[in-house]
Image (spheres, rainbow, N blue to C red):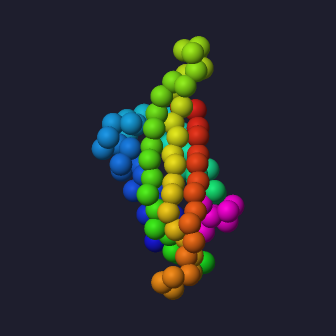
Amino acid sequence: MNMQKVISAVETAARRNELIHSGLYRETHALYHAIMEGMEGVTRGHLAIGDMSRTVGLRFAVVRGKPFTNEGEGEWIAVAFYGTIGAPIKGSEHETVGLGINHI
């Protein structure tokens, strides 16, 4: 699996579940940055999988909301990843987690 597949899977799920509107660039852009920040945690800052003979098996969740009591703070979107990462050899992977949060 490569980074583009991870990004596409999360974006597709967010659109299908109406967490972002595909016609609004800012929403897609905010989601993209939350994904990238979350993947930095998963890959420990080396945003490369597939290209480096690393494979990942991830589950993810996307949430959107207004976490502050002041409505003027606006909406935020978060992406959480959990799964395994490692060399493409069964049994050599380890657990990993990543979280990305971005304002819309």
Q: Tell me what residue is drawn at x 55 percent, y 25 percent.
A: 67
Q: Residue furthest bottom?
A: 89
x, y percent for residue 2: 49, 69
x, y percent for residue 12: 36, 50
Say which of 60 and 77 sits in front: 60
Queried whether the magenta region covers residue 72, the answer comes back as no
Residue 46 appears in the rendering: yes
Left or right: 26 as drawn, with respect to 52: left
Residue 2 appears in the rendering: no
Q: Is residue 66 above or below residue 79?
A: above
Q: Tell me what residue is drawn at x 46 percent, y 68 percent.
A: 57
Q: Tell me what residue is drawn at x 51 percent, y 36 percent.
A: 77
Q: Is residue 52 above or below residue 48?
A: below
x, y percent for residue 26: 50, 35
Say which of 94 and 30 sits in front: 94
Queried whether the magenta region covers residue 43, the answer comes back as yes
Q: Which residues are magenta?
A: 42-48
When asked about the image quadrant of residue 87, the answer is: bottom right
Q: Tell me what residue is drawn at x 51 percent, y 82 percent.
A: 91
Which SS type dominates the magenta stretch?
Answer: loop
Q: Is residue 18 above or below residue 94?
A: above
Q: Is residue 34 above or below residue 72?
A: below
x, y percent for residue 8: 42, 56
